[in-house]
Amino acid sequence: MMRALRSILFLALLLLCQTAWAAKGTILYIPLDNRPVCLAYTVQTMRAAGWDVQTPPAAYIADDKRCGDPEQLFAWLEQHAKSSAAVVASSDALLYGGLVASRTHEIPLEVLQQRAERLVNLKSTHGGQTVYVFTTIMRSPKASAAPVEPAYYKEWGPKLFRLGELEDKLELKEIRRREVRELADLRAEIPVEVLEDLHTRRSNNIRATELLLHGVESGDFDYLLIGRDDTATFSQAHREARSMDILVNELPKERIRFFAGADQLGMLLLSRASSRLQYELPLVNVTYAPGKGGATVPTYEDDTIAESAKQHIYAAGGFPARLRRHADLVLAVNTPADGVTLEASDAGNNYNVPPETERFVNKVERLLKNKHQVAVADVKYGNGADNGLVKELFDRKMAYSLAAYGGWNTAGNSLGFALAQGLLYDMYAPEAQQKLLEVRYFDDWAYQANVRMQAYRQLIWPNYWPNSGLDDEQRGAAEQFITQEIKTLTAPYMGDMAARYQFTLPWSRMFEVKVESKNEG
């Protein structure tokens, strides 16, 4: 087997470079927050692969109502570090208290710097084990509001996005004459105190991230993964990313990567830890749906999907394989034929199967018949699955033959999660593998692409309920509606499987659902 031969060679290389465990052991994991994709789904995946993944007490981790507790997280991490094989940690959790807190905090720069230095020193002061860290560049949302952004975003959010977009264009010399005037008007219109606060927040985030780069340079971090959270092609986040790129490119590529996404980063680094601790270097071949394919630049991102796929493979501990016959995993990416990523709620996302989707499924079917392990990254639409693709997978009885499936949020989120789960495929028991796929179909397809919008139209909007911040009564009614609609939608494809799961709204908002087996709840 090719993987076994490469493992022997890779073992020899690793023994020259570092000491690691040769068998499965304990991995300490500090997530961004307690959203299902960051915590429950990720831990479930790694435990299904045989790893003892330990996480801090729930009270220390950010949830929908409060920030995490960096001091308690550090104390827990330092207490348990010496008994672990590896550490995978979110710097956003350790510096700010979570992803939302990284945008809304009032923490002085001096405190952030102290925490960054404490994280960099973890390896040398608490056991010398492998340390993987993931961090994010602050996003540039087109529209958002408290509590996930500072309060002024409710009034100024769209104009702040446009300001960053135009300033990015100005620096790149791609701004039009009429946009120069618009930029001047925006600078004059937005209150000075809002601009100052925004600048301070973003500047402190960048300065803290630059301190983390020292951990790569010194070798205190075995890997640093920097994510660009919701980064449009022209935006303030893209502008900052260009500056960060200069610094990142001066560091060894074998210890750092920088690409679009946030919520998939923990899963990617846990997959990397698994490969490295077992001395494996899996090869991944990538193939695309007909049409624009890898040249697609997805919504919410600023790189082509081909570049994103390559960077994700490196980050997850793999290596791109040009020849499919050498690959341990084939990553099949379902892209829009015209390269335009619409929302999964778009009317065009129906159950009709266009020729390009049929050809893509034909390709996946051939790969499976030829005994390839295939992970499908469904990025044709943003924020949900391609209904036509999922229908074909079930109709042809291929849905549970995949190594992994992902199609839930941004392209990077979906691709990264599917890739990481797919790389762990050989370690799952058949029953565990089916459960992982069931969760993804219930979440990415049933809820994200279908039932969420039904809930908006039939329940949330008619009753004038908020999209976020549902009270207990509203949340209960929404969960009841969602559960029934998922059962109805999935019955023709998955039988009564939905009855074995519970579907909840853990952050009291409609954006994400938690899919949990009743045997585990």
Image (spheres, rainbow, N blue to C red):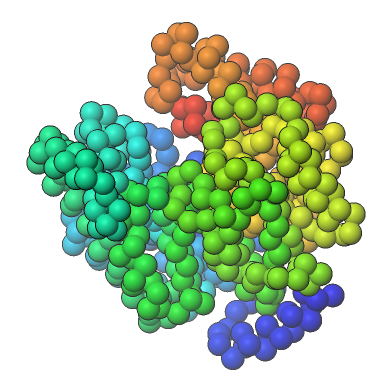
Q: Is residue 2 left or right of residue 138?
A: right
Q: Nearer the viewer, residue 498 or 79?
A: 498
- Above or below residue 444? Residue 120 is below
Residue 116 rendering spot, x and y as whole percentages: 31, 66
x, y (%) of residue 250? 37, 78
Q: Position of residue 429 (x, y in %)?
A: 81, 53
Instruction: Tell me what residue is drawn at x 74 percent, y 84 percent.
Output: 8
In this rendering, does residue 256 appear at all? yes
Establish if 318 lies above or below 206: below
- Residue 477's image quarter? top right
Q: Decide if residue 70 is in sight here.
A: no
Which residue does the image show at 27% across and 40% down from the upper left?
162
Q: Is 261 or 24 nearer to us in this picture?
A: 261
Q: Tell me where residue 154 sits by quadrant.
A: top left
Q: Name the residue at 30% across, 65% down.
A: 243
Residue at the image point whose x is 46% and y is 19% from the top:
472
Query: Quarter holding the N terminus?
Result: bottom right
